[in-house]
Amino acid sequence: GQTTLPPLTPFSAHCLGYAFATMVLEQREQVTGGHRSNINSKNDDDETITICIGRDPREHGVVLADAFARGAAEVPNVKVVYTGIATTPALFEFCRSSLCDGGVMVTASHLPGDRNGFKFFSKHAGGGFNKAQIHQMIGIAQEHSQVWFDRGALPSTSGTNGVFCSEVVNWMPIYEEKLQQALWKQVNSNENVDHTLPLEGLKIVLNAGNGSGGFFRQVLEDLGANVDGSLHTTPDSSFPNGIPNPEYDEMIQETVSACEDAHADLGILLDTDADRCGMVAPRTYQRLENGTIRPTGYEPLNRNRLIALMGVIYSQQSPGCAIVTDSVTSTGLSKFLEQDLGLKHVRFLRGYANVISKAQTLNEQQLMNAEVAIETSGHCAVKENGFLDDGTFTAVKVLGLLAQERRKASHEESTSSSPVPPKSLLDLISSLQELDEVMEFRLEVLDGGLESMIGLFDFVALEIDALCEVQKGWKVDHDNLEGIRVETDPDGGFFLLRKSLHDPVMCLQVEANSRESAKQSVIDPLLGLFQSQPRIAQTLDLSALELYSLGKN
């Protein structure tokens, strides 16, 4: 894919490795109250810190991991270990479990296969690096690049032959055990944990998309699940079935088909580095003529539905708690969480780092008991797991609920003269109001400039606000914190216009009862406004809205 960002080269990875190791070493010394030792001396083993590097299956990740490791190893008192293919949450867990002081995941997540990047974690800085820390790290890396420039040389590399390190480690089993313990804890009481097989009798389809999340199949199997129908659990750098993304229709439909073939109780979709998930669940369980009970009618369990289900879990586990979400969640979700479950719904900004930070702030200031921070994209972090963004832990929570519901059904069946069909997970959110037409439009700025988009957005938002005064049924949602959100009808229809997090694009989210309702109540009025304003019409690509209005997309 096209990008205006500079390429991530082995040399830049080397300099970032040096900068990251330097910062983690300093963070350790600040936490321990020690003074920074002579940076040119390695005479004290007690001062050594450990940096662990993992990667997703992308082949060029080996080259970048090697360069990063060599840069980190340039810093005195730093030991670098390599754990091979891993997941982003696992690297955080390695730091939290004191296996290492700093963790680095080489991944581009769901982005195209030719992209790559780094995610940074520090045991001594409370988890993932924030923006300020990343900017500081880049500054150190730039200074270090000058050192190599002055030498007139480039650092050594191993190419694709391996990763330079002090030790190759396999720490994923430690992370796997953490997930197993979490499931045992949820299914059984905290006081009397029953280490049986909590998923015994359940059929689970895991679609890891040939990414790093294939390890989760063994976790499920060890807990008693039948995972025979699982898909693409072997890491493959070519991603023959496309880059895994739980939001992609192709991955969802592929998982639906696999669940139908396997008669699965649940399908789990993971993205490339397994920090995000989606689900597929049967709509009902039917009893066949021979008395067999079989799941049927599989549907996606993602976006607002997944948030609603996490609400069900935490309404039982922590009544009255708060769920923090991104800005594009539906009106129906708010009603379900607050009116049906008695929870508090805090709608914040897009970006999983934003919702996590908001949840932590609410807790620190004792304003609410925020248990869950979750995006409609499937990024989810919970307080009980240290607000670690973890797709597999989210799956564990849902699996725990599924196992509990299956136990209830078994108990009811034991007191009944005939088999009792179990509840579907979708039954637990049956009162969630869902609208039939849900669309997102990406409106690009014609000159491709980020500054143009930002300036234009403020103008567009003001024009929409003014139109609300005269447009029938439109009402600005003043509680909204991102972009401009307008309620368009009393049964939950709305649209939200916001700036993209990364691109010169305005994102328009529309929800309505029908396509015709969306056209009449949202698209046509917006088109009329945009086309009447030369500044908007000449700057913003309106073709997607025009095609929708004409019924052509």
Image (spheres, rainbow, N blue to C red):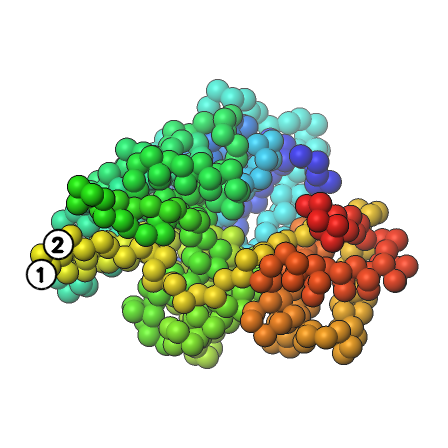
Q: Visible in this render: residue 25?
A: no
The mark tally for this picture is 2
Q: CA distance from mark 2 to mark 1?
A: 9 Å
Find residue 142 and report its horizontal and vertical position in percent. 67, 43
Q: Which residue is mark 2?
A: 418
| Quadrant assignment for the C terminus | top right
Q: Which mark is residue 237?
A: none
Q: Is residue 391 left or right of residue 503?
A: left
Q: Quadrant of residue 500?
A: bottom right
At label 2, which amino acid type do we have?
Ser
Nearer-the-camera pick, 158 or 321: 321
Q: Nearer the viewer, residue 296 or 351?
A: 296
The picture places residue 451, in percent across and down from the top left corner, at 80, 55
Q: Is residue 195 above or below residue 532?
A: above
Residue at the (12%, 54%) spot, across then down = 418
- Residue at 76%, 78% in the rendered image: 469
Please provide percent x and percent y for residue 252.
46, 42
Mark 1: give few (<14), some (14-19) or many (20+) Cα within 10 Å: few
Residue 408 figure quarter: bottom left
Q: Secondary structure at mark 1?
A: loop
Residue at (39% x, 63% y) in the render: 430
The residue that label 1 is drawn on is 415
Q: Nearer the viewer, residue 214 or 247?
A: 247
Could you tell me which secondary element the residue under label 2 belongs to?
loop
The amino acid marked with disc number 1 is: Thr
Q: Is residue 371 above or below residue 151?
A: below
